[in-house]
Structure formats: structure tokens, C-alpha cells
């Protein structure tokens, strides 16, 4: 059998490969081997999760950010970005709307906004915890000190998403200004795991400077770190960033990475992302068919949506939460899967 398929089989059995084998896979994959991978990845996801797709209600509560990541549309240096913040009452209203639509996980995502201090975040988490005791709370608010992460956890947060962006230090430094540190980001991920969060890392596919080598580093990092969740989507340029003229990542390579990650993490919670839905009208459906098992419709107020533009042409910026919920249900049903409303905790956690 061809070596690509052999390596894919090995990955399915062992959930790990050496770095050079990943490089070989990225260099030698073709349409046929991609199909082979997607079939195995879909089998593994069905063994562990059937045809269920978990939903997370995404609340983009602030687009203010102190950082200047070269790829991101809400970077501090983008003076064309109109900034907004939701207050605690507005966030709770989003949760209430979401709860009525059947959401049992809320993801609070925002830029690294100094306008909310540790007390503010802890208070917001506590209020959601008290008001919706049967829901999971996920934070996605960037890098904080360990004691703050601990405080949010004690206040009732269950999960934390912090994409590592790339597991290769030299590549990390091409994507971020000097004020940001690769080591610190990795330290944050370690702290989050030790505290007891269900942790998500992730990266963009096709980001400037990414190579088969750096992608192999990402796979090795994921198999060693064993996150509960992995968020990946294609890089898409944003017109007001230093990467405005760079090329977007492709759907094919994104799906390939999703398939590999499903074989590395048979129990992983892996979203089919909005970015994937942005580069192709059927991107999210294809993501699910290649091993993903989560979708994250937007619960943010429609009036703010357009302002949380991490990349150009982001979809779902004009639709109400209920519309996205209905749209995604139909999309999942059309490919033989269905959205479920349970919390969808990692099967590897007992908390
Ligand atoms: N294209 C695709 N994804 C992006 N992100 C930020 N900017 C872009 C972009 N231009 C991703 C990053 C970040 C997550 C919230 O969104 O990986 O961690
Ligand atoms: Fe938002 Fe389809 S998911 S409109």
C-alpha cells in the first residue's frame, strides 16, 4: 500500500507519528489519500460520538485588544476598527437568548481588553454560573496570569480556548510583534490544563510563513499536549492588517489537518469553524465530514457582529442567533448529522 495510507493507518492505531512522518504526509498527500483520511476520521468520530454535533453559543463580548497580531482584524493598530464592549447585563441577555434556543455552552470570546479586569471577568462568570447552572462556560480571552485563570475557574468557568497559533517559535515570531512571547503562550496553555480546565489550542491553516515543517510541529505539539479541544480554520487576510495581501489558506489543507487531528485525538472536541464556512459555502459541512464534531454559531447582538471582523467577509454577521441556529441544524441534517443540545463535555473529563 502507498506509504501515505500506511502512515494514516498507523496514526489511527497509535494516535501519534514522528515529526518526519507528518512532513512526509503533508508533502505527499493527494486527492485520493485525502479521501482515505476523511473516511477513517469520520469512522473514528462516529465510533465515539455517533452523528451528534455539539453546539456552542459564541458571544464576542469585546473587540478591544491590546495586542497587534499581524493577521488579526481587531489588532490594536487597526484604526478603522470601530470598538465596542458588552456589559454584564448585555452578556447575560445573550446567554438568555441562547438558552432559549437550546444552547448549553456559552463561549465568551474577546480581544485582550484591559477594560475588564480580573474582578470583572470573575463576576461575569459567577453571574452566568448562578443564572444557568446547567450550562458550561468557556472563556476565550487570551493570556492572563495563572492566578487569574485560577480565579475564573473557581468562579465557575469550565473550559478555556487559547489557540497556540503555531508550535514553531520562529513562525510564531513572524505572526506576532516582539511584545508577544511564544514561551508565555505555551506557559498559559500548561497552566490552564494544570488548573483543571478543558483546554483548547489551535492554529490557522495557511498562515504566512507556515510550512510543512511548522504544520508537523503543530501535529506533534497536539499529540504531546493532548488538548480536549482543537480549533483550526483557514487563515483569511483582513484588509487593514500587515497581511492584507497574503494568500488565504485552502479548504483542502484545512480538512486534511482536521482529519489528522481526529486520528490523534479520537475523543477530541473539534469545531468546524466559521472561517472554514467563509472560504467555502459548504466548508462547515465538509469539516464535519472530515472529523469535526462541534459548531459555534454566533450569539452576539447583530449590531456588533460586523465589528468583530477578524478577517474579511466573515459569514453570519447579519443573521440573528435563531437564524444561525436553524441554518446550522439544516446544514447538519443535510449531511446526515444532527445538532444536540447537551453540554458536550470532553469524554476525558469527569468534572
Ligand atoms: N484569519 C483566520 N483566523 C483568524 N484568527 C485571527 N485572525 C484571523 C484571520 N485573519 C483566529 C486566530 C485567533 C482566533 C480567535 O481567530 O487563530 O486565535
Ligand atoms: Fe449563520 Fe448559516 S450559520 S446564517
Image (cartoon, rainbow, N blue to C red):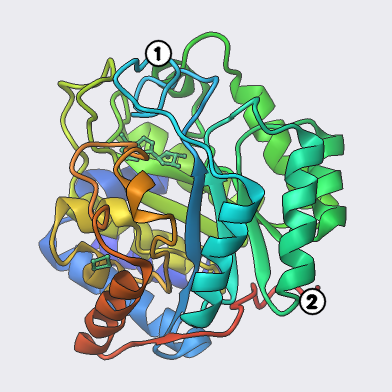
Residue displayed at 28% across by 58% down: 256
**Spot occupied by residue 183 in the image (x, y as percentages of width and height):** 66, 24
Circles 2 and 1: CB distance less than 8 Å? no
Depicted 197 relative to depicted 64: above or below:
below
Q: Residues within 10 Å of mark 2 (few under 14, many from 20)?
A: few
Residue displayed at 52% across by 42% down: 163
Identify the image quadrant of residue 52: bottom left
User: Which residue position is annotated with label 2?
Assistant: 350
**Spot occupied by residue 227 in the image (x, y as percentages of width and height):** 62, 56
Left or right of 252 in this view: 305: right
Name the quarter where the N terminus is drawn.
bottom left
Element class at badge 2? loop
Q: Which mark is residue 117?
A: none
> 57 or 50: which is nearer to us?
57
On the question of residue 311 being in view, the answer is yes
> 341 or 335: which is nearer to us?
341
> 121 or 158: which is nearer to us?
121
> 327 or 270: which is nearer to us?
327
Depicted 68 relative to depicted 236: above or below:
above
Identify the image quadrant of residue 149: top right
**Spot occupied by residue 155 in the image (x, y as percentages of width and height):** 84, 55
User: Which residue position is annotated with label 1?
Assistant: 77
Residue displayed at 56% across by 63% down: 93
**Spot occupied by residue 265 in the image (x, y as percentages of width and height):** 54, 66
The label nearer to you, 2 versus 1, is 1
Amino acid at each position: 500500500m502507498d506509504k501515505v495510507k500506511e502512515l494514516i493507518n498507523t496514526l489511527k492505531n497509535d494516535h501519534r507519528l514522528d515529526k518526519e512522518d507528518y512532513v512526509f504526509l503533508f508533502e505527499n498527500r493527494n486527492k485520493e489519500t485525502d479521501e482515505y483520511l476523511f473516511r477513517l476520521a469520520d469512522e473514528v468520530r462516529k465510533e465515539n460520538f455517533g452523528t451528534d454535533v455539539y453546539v456552542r453559543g459564541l458571544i464576542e463580548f469585546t473587540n478591544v485588544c491590546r495586542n497587534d497580531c499581524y493577521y488579526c482584524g481587531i489588532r490594536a493598530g487597526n484604526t478603522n476598527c470601530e470598538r465596542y464592549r458588552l456589559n454584564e447585563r448585555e452578556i447575560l441577555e445573550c446567554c438568555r437568548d441562547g438558552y432559549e434556543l437550546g444552547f448549553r455552552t456559552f463561549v465568551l470570546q474577546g480581544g485582550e481588553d484591559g477594560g475588564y479586569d480580573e474582578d470583572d471577568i470573575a463576576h461575569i462568570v459567577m453571574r452566568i454560573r448562578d443564572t444557568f447552572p446547567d450550562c458550561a462556560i468557556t472563556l476565550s480571552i487570551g493570556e492572563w496570569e495563572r492566578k487569574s485563570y485560577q480565579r475564573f475557574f473557581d468562579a465557575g468557568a469550565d473550559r478555556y480556548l487559547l489557540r497556540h497559533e503555531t508550535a514553531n517559535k520562529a513562525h510564531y515570531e513572524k505572526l506576532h510583534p516582539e511584545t508577544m512571547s511564544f514561551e508565555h503562550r505555551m506557559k498559559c496553555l500548561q497552566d490552564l490544563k494544570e488548573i483543571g480546565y478543558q483546554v483548547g489550542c489551535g492554529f490557522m491553516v495557511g498562515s504566512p510563513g507556515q510550512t510543512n515543517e511548522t504544520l508537523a510541529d503543530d501535529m506533534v505539539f497536539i499529540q504531546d499536549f493532548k488538548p480536549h479541544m482543537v480549533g483550526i480554520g483557514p487563515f483569511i487576510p483582513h484588509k487593514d492588517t500587515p497581511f492584507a495581501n497574503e494568500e488565504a489558506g485552502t479548504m483542502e489543507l484545512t480538512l486534511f489537518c482536521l482529519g489528522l487531528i481526529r486520528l490523534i485525538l479520537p475523543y477530541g472536541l473539534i469545531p468546524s469553524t466559521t472561517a472554514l464556512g467563509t472560504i467555502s459555502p459548504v466548508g462547515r459541512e465538509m469539516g464535519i465530514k472530515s472529523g469535526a464534531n462541534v459548531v459555534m454559531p454566533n450569539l452576539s447582538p447583530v449590531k456588533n457582529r460586523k465589528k468583530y471582523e477578524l478577517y474579511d467577509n466573515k459569514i453570519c454577521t447579519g443573521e440573528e442567533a435563531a437564524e444561525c441556529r436553524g441554518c446550522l441544524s439544516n446544514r447538519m441534517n443535510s449531511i446526515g448529522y444532527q445538532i444536540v443540545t447537551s453540554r458536550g463535555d470532553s469524554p476525558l473529563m469527569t468534572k
